[in-house]
C-alpha cells in the first residue's frame, strides 16, 4: 500500500504545473519571421501536337512582395513517355516583361535537372516567365511534367510543384482494306 501511495505522490509531483519548465520563446526578428513562398502560376505550350518541331514551352512563376530574392530556377522532367530534348542556347527568361540575363545553365532537363542561374538575383514582387525551346515535341501523347524548384538567397531551396504540359496525337488506328 505504501508503494502505491509513493508512486502516486511521485506522479503528482512530476505532473505539477509549477515544475514544468516553459519552452523558450524566441523573439521574432525580420530574418526569423516566415515569408511567403513563390507560386507556380502556369505552364503552357504553343503547339501541343506530338512530334511538332515548332513549339515553345512557357513556365510562369510569381514571387510575393515579402519573398527572398531568387538566384536560380531548376527544372527536372519527372513524367512522360519520352525524354524531351531542349535547345539550351535558346532558353529565355523574362522578369516583369523584361528579358534578364542567364549567367549559367547546367543539365539538360530530361536525364539531369536543368538549372538556370541568373546574373542578378530576381527581386521580390516579380513575375518570372521561362521559355524553353525543344528540338521537337515528344513522340508519344500524354502528360509531361517538369518539377520546378527555386533557389533563393541564403541557400534556401523550395520545390514549387509540377509544371504540366499535355500533348495530343492523331488517331493511331491502322485501317485495313
Image (cartoon, helix red, strand yellow):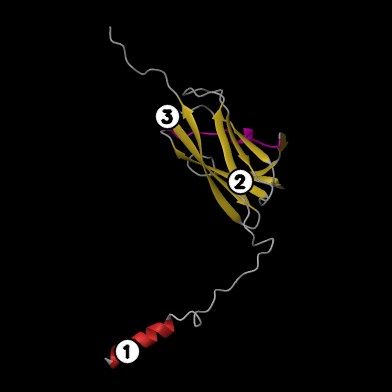
Residue 86 in the magenta stretch? The answer is yes
Q: Which mark is residue 142?
A: 3
Q: Which mark is residue 144?
A: none
- Residue 141 position within the rendered picture, expressed as x and y whole percent measured from the top left: 42, 27
Q: Quadrant of residue 25?
A: bottom right
Horizontal arrangement in the rendering, residue 135 relative to residue 177 (left or right): right
Q: What residue lies at 58% left-to-right and 28% top-to-bottom?
A: 56
Q: Quadrant of residue 104?
A: top right
- Marks 1 & 3, CB-CB < 8 Å contact: no
Q: Report, in whole angstroms, how far the alpha carbon at label 2 lies from the one at label 3.
A: 27 Å
Q: What residue lies at 62% left-to-right and 69% top-to-bottom?
A: 26
Q: Which image quarter holds the C terminus?
A: top left
- Residue 101 position within the rendered picture, expressed as x and y whole percent measured from the top left: 71, 40
Residue 143 in the magenta stretch? The answer is no
- Numbered range of the magenta stretch: 82-96
Residue under numbered circle 1: 5
**Closest to the observer, 3 or 96:** 3
Residue under numbered circle 2: 38
SS assignment at label 1: helix
Q: Report, in whole angstroms, how far the alpha carbon at label 1 lies from the one at label 3.
A: 71 Å
Horizontal arrangement in the rendering, residue 26 relative to residue 169 (left or right): right
- Residue 68 position within the rendered picture, expressed as x and y whole percent measured from the top left: 66, 52
Amino acid at each position: 500500500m505504501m508503494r502505491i501511495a509513493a508512486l502516486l505522490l511521485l506522479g503528482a509531483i512530476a505532473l505539477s504545473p509549477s515544475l514544468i519548465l516553459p519552452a523558450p520563446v524566441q523573439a521574432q526578428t525580420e530574418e526569423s519571421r516566415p515569408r511567403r513562398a513563390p507560386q507556380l502560376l502556369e505552364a503552357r505550350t504553343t503547339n501541343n501536337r506530338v512530334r511538332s518541331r515548332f513549339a515553345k514551352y512557357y513556365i510562369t512563376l510569381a514571387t510575393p512582395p515579402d519573398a527572398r530574392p531568387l538566384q536560380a530556377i531548376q527544372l527536372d522532367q519527372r513524367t512522360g513517355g519520352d525524354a524531351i530534348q531542349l535547345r539550351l542556347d535558346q532558353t529565355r527568361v523574362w522578369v516583369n516583361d523584361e528579358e534578364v540575363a542567364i549567367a549559367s545553365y547546367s543539365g539538360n532537363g530530361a536525364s539531369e535537372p536543368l538549372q538556370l542561374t541568373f546574373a542578378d538575383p530576381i527581386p521580390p514582387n516579380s513575375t518570372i516567365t521561362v521559355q524553353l525551346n525543344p528540338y521537337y515535341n515528344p513522340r508519344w501523347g500524354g502528360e509531361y511534367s517538369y518539377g520546378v524548384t527555386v533557389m533563393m538567397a541564403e541557400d534556401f531551396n523550395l520545390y514549387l510543384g509540377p509544371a504540366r504540359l499535355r500533348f495530343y496525337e492523331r488517331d493511331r488506328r491502322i485501317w485495313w482494306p
